[in-house]
Amino acid sequence: MRRLLIICLLLLFTVAVINAESNQEDIPAKVQKKVTSTINIRQETQKREDAWAGQKAELIARYRSLQAELEYLKKVKVKTEQMLHAQEVQIAEIEHMIKESAKIKKELQSYLELVIEQLEEQIKKDIPYLSKERADRITSIKETLILPDKPLAEKYRRVMEALEIEVEYGRSVEVYQETVDLGGEPLLVDVLRVGRLSLFCRTPDGKLIGTFDQRDQKWVVLPSKYRREINKAIEIANRQRPIELVRLPIGRIAVP
């Protein structure tokens, strides 16, 4: 029994020695393995660090670019807001001008119509010279004024033109032919217009002379004593003789 125990102990000792020797032989391999593993881990870590460094630099550059773009967009936003505000002010001014223009156009349209009405009344009360020509002019202007598609500037021009013509009548002298009722019968005569003051007439043969009576609104025959002066005035108006003073029976000025 004791011998068997000694044999067992020896076997255990032998196994222990063999295991110890085996462990001592594996140490360098384990160390090498650990070193290799550490180196691999370090290399992998370095790669990751390098990759992260590249990404970081790219992100920083992108951040700075976005920040610069943001600043630029802020400036653009401010300028755009200023422009929009200026345009809003301008639009408001234009809308106000359009409203005022429409108002002025309406008022001017009414004014031009009133002017033509007054001018028409004045022509009716005036001495009857160039009656058809003046009446046709007024009719044409009135037809122009009622056209909605006719520019207001054109309407204004026509009315002012008519007024200028009427004013010019008052400071001019002319001779034209017209058929008038003189001495109870219609006769073709030479009519002498002296401004807007008086009308005189003479038959082509020079036998009859007359004047338009503004009070009675008719032509009346004048005494022959005025024939020479009327003939002279007609020749001056036709530029057939030099300008000189003539005595015409214009009559008295009526004071209301």
Image (cartoon, rainbow, N blue to C red):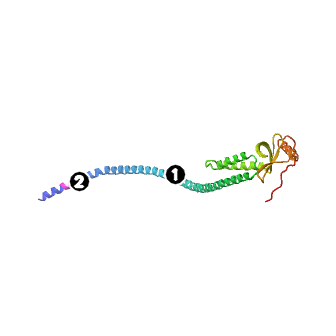
Task: First in sequence, mark 1 or 2: give its number.
Answer: 2
Could you say which disc has been placed on residue 17 in the image? 2
Between disc 1 and disc 2, the foreground one is 1
Magenta range is 11-16
Task: Identify the secondary structure beneath mark 2.
Answer: helix
Could you say which disc has been placed on residue 65 in the image? 1
Cα–Cα gap, marks 1 and 2: 71 Å
Task: Identify the secondary structure beneath mark 1.
Answer: helix
Q: Is residue 204 left or right of residue 89?
A: right
Give the quadrant of residue 243: top right
Q: Residue at x 26, y 51 (%)?
A: 22
Estimate how packed mark 2 is, as few (under 14), some (14 to 19) or many (20 or more) residues with alpha carbons within 10 Å.
few
**Main SS category, magenta section:** helix
Q: Quadrant of the C terminus?
A: bottom right
Percent across and percent down for residue 144 are 65, 48
What amino acid type is highlighted by mark number 1?
Ser
